[in-house]
Amino acid sequence: MELAQTIFLPLCLCLMFLIAQQTLLVSAAHKRQKHHPIKLFVFGDSLADTGNSPNDPNAPIHPWEYPFGITFPGKPTGRFSDGRVLTDFVAEFIRLKSPTPYRLRTMGVKKPTKYGMNFAHGGTGVLDGYVAPNMTTQIDFFQQLVDESVFKPKHLRKSVALIVLAGNDYGFYAALHHSYEIPQSFMESVVNQLTMDLKRLYDLGVKRVAVTTLPPMGCSSAFTSPLHKTCNEFVNAEAAVHNLLLQKAVAKLNKETQNSFIILDLYASFRSVFKNKGDRLGSIKFENPLKPCVLGEPWVVNKTTGVKKYTVCEDPKSTFFWDNAHPTQQGWRAVCLNLQATLGQLYYF
């Protein structure tokens, strides 16, 4: 608990640092020329995956089976939600169709590279964990396509890269060590590798790179069950430490690259949605934002009887969380409404 007790003052400083950095970035963005991004390249995990995870019956989550996709498009598509995920909303914001998942590029998709490519894969992290491919390998896939001139430099210069992280590295560490207390040295190793990945994308030719902070992991159903009333602030504080390290790393990168990197603050956006009482014009309110649509033991089915050990709510639009970790389509919509000002910077190269 010593870690949690010593980081709240730094968290306040982190907030001040974030506000100052974002103000400078907005100012710098408007000194650039405004362009319409022509492609979107996505890297990360299940918060951004739109079809790269295989249809594996032995996997703990089955995004290719009912009830995934019941809101959009009405059937499972490999998204970890009832409908659209962060990738889809970012693509829509920059007026592109959602890019084709890398795994599906050779499966009869027409013009699979037209809008970019999505390399994000559910369950993965920055470092090696339970699931491959990690972030570095995803970028390897991208580099191979660049080396093969599938994506040319003239395209990359006017494209956007989106890197999305849910915190799987820390979940893997916690499971391995049977403790939610994550050493700062491990967080630094994650952020250091992430920083190298970000710089690598820039060096490959993508001149606008957006990376997410970790969301408040302690507010997921894994930590709020069974009452779904309060978050685990110790876990949230650890996410905030990661985010502070990321802020510092991105600030350094921006000094070296003329402000090419943007942070999408999922932590603050999620928190803002949770606190919303419906008094903000145009915002989306959830009656109990911590209670997921899927209750019980998500995706667990009795192998003998076939009886599901979970229930699905009647209206996913009424809930922020879909299951124990992933937002609903409506949840993502609410998050992206809070991110509009930052997303607007993606138009400036």
Image (cartoon, rainbow, N blue to C red):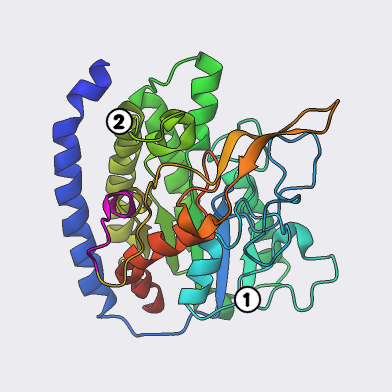
Question: What residue do we see at 71% from left, 48% from top?
Answer: 53
**Residue 283 quadrant:** bottom left
* Image side of residue 44 versus residue 346, left or right: right
Question: Farthest front residue?
Answer: 314
Element at label 2: helix
Residue 217: x percent and y percent? Answer: 41, 37
* Image side of residue 177 versus residue 139, left or right: left
Q: Which residue is mark 1?
A: 115
Residue 206: x percent and y percent? Answer: 50, 68
**Residue 132 quadrant:** top right
In the image shown, does 23 or 300 lie closer to the viewer? Answer: 300
Asked whether residue 211 is drawn in magenta, I would say no
Residue 93 drawn above or below residue 259: below
Q: Residues within 10 Å of mark 1 (few under 14, many from 20)?
A: some
Q: Earlier in the sequence, mark 2 or mark 1?
A: 1
Which residues make up the magenta segment? Answer: 271-280
Residue 317 drawn above or below residue 122: below
Asked whether residue 279 is drawn in magenta, I would say yes
Q: Three-letter amino acid code at disc 1?
A: Tyr
